[in-house]
Image (tube, rainbow, N blue to C red):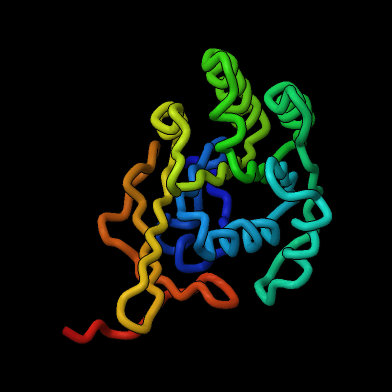
Amino acid sequence: MVNRLRTGIDVLDRKLDGGIPAGSIVVLSAQPASQAELFLYELTATRGTLWLSLDRTAESVIASIEQTPANTGDPTVRHISGEAPLDNAGKLVSALPETSNLIVDPLDVLEAQEPHSRFRAFMNDLQNHIVNTGSLAIVHCLDGRDVPPLRDTTEHFADVVFQLDTTTTGDEVENRLAIPKFRGGRAPTDVIKLNLVEEVSIDTSRDIA
């Protein structure tokens, strides 16, 4: 049996037969104007976590984690800035310890780096290290107005793809999660309607036609 690592989100862990196979890269694809970060916050409660922030400062990420009412851990947060983000991210990834979480938020900054071959090399190194340490990598991919040209490459590397769709219908904000790709396991065929308010939970309300 492949070792499964919990996501910390009970609804997902049940759907995924206990969690995600160790050594997996997971894409969390969501609009920038969504509550997708709740997934990342709750993941930090499961095991030691290294959070690489490509946009927000480390202080901003830590403050957000401390303020959320969701169950969280105490991740190590590093802000990657400067002119060589792929090199800086690669150095931190190479030091990731056994059975850890790695969060890259958002991956878009790295996907936009030139030449494209350097991003592919980074993803290969990431994949090798995650497999060798039996860890779990979650890469937050913004599905907004300006999608990087290498998003197809990212999703091809990924072992699991979570697609979060946030829409405003009438006077409600609706969140639906699809898992179209699950390498090495059985992908759920149904779309999960979620409540993303203070934590990630199933929306048990019934749709009224």
* Residue 54, placed above or below residue 167: above
Does residue 73 appear left or right of residue 116 in this picture? right
Q: Is residue 7 above or below residue 168?
A: above
On the image, which quarter does residue 189 sit in? bottom left
* Residue beneath the point at 46% across and 75% down: 195
Count of numbered badges drawn on the protein: 0
Q: Is residue 200 visible?
A: yes
Q: Position of residue 113 (x, y in %)?
A: 59, 23
Q: Residue at x 74, y 24 (%)?
A: 83
Give 49 or 149, whichever is nearer the viewer.
149
Pinpoint residue 28: horizontal percent, then vertical percent. 49, 49
> Can you say which quadrant of the picture contains the C terminus?
bottom left
Classify residue 115 by image quadrant. Answer: top right
Q: Percent from the top left, x then y, of residue 204?
A: 36, 82
Q: Position of residue 158 (x, y in %)?
A: 46, 34
Q: Foreground residue, 76 or 22?
A: 76
Residue 70, placed above or below residue 116: below
Residue ID at (78%, 42%)? 79
Q: In this view of the protein, can residue 100 be seen by the observer?
A: no
Whether 50 is drawn above or below 131: the answer is: below
Foreground of the two, 44 or 32: 32
Please report the residue visible at 44 percent of the width from the left and 64 percent of the height from the top.
14
**Of all residues shown, which one is farthest toward the front?**
145
